[in-house]
Image (cartoon, rainbow, N blue to C red):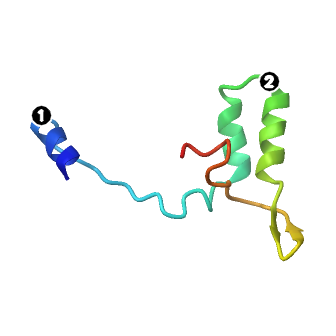
């Protein structure tokens, strides 16, 4: 609240709080790679990122491929 108050006192008319709950669970892989491809020319890097995104998760010893979402706390997460 103190940070929001400082923002308002600095002259900004609004403070916006965004809840990113489940955001990383729903990232569409192809769209993300497409957007990244607009800035990253090296296709090898894009392929590596795609492989990481689609690597899947292990549940009870069985690897299940990922069709969407990104691991939180991983290299693609800003956390």
Residue at horizontal 48%, vertical 63%? 21
Element on which disc 1 rests: loop
Element on which disc 2 rests: loop
* Residue reaching furthest to the top: 41
Instruction: Please indicate whether residue 62 sits to the left or right of residue 19 in the image.
Output: right
For label 2, the crowd category at 10 Å Cα-Cα, with few meaning under 14, some 14 to 19 and many 20 or more, is few
Residue at horizontal 55%, vertical 43%? 78
Instruction: Please indicate whether residue 19 sits to the left or right of residue 70 in the image.
Output: left
Q: CA distance from mark 2 to mark 1?
A: 43 Å
* Mark nearer the N terminus (2 vs 1): 1
- Residue hosting label 1: 11
Return the x and y of residue 70 as percentages of the image width and height: 67, 54
Return the x and y of residue 33 as percentages of the image width and height: 72, 41
* Count of picture labels: 2
Residue 79 vs residue 51, the one in the foreground:
79
- Residue hosting label 2: 42
Return the x and y of residue 32 as percentages of the image width and height: 67, 44
Q: Are marks 2 and 1 in contact (CB under 8 Å)?
A: no
Residue at horizontal 74%, vertical 48%? 30
Residue at horizontal 71%, vertical 31%? 37
Return the x and y of residue 39 as percentages of the image width and height: 65, 25
């Amino acid at each position: 609240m103190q940070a929001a108050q400082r923002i308002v006192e600095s002259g900004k008319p609004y403070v916006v709080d965004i809840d990113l709950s489940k955001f990383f669970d729903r990232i569409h892989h192809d769209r993300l790679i497409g957007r990244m491809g607009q800035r990253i020319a090296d296709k090898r890097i894009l392929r590596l990122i795609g492989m990481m995104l689609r690597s899947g998760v292990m549940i009870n010893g069985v690897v299940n491929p990922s069709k969407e979402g990104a691991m939180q706390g991983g290299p693609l997460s800003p956390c």
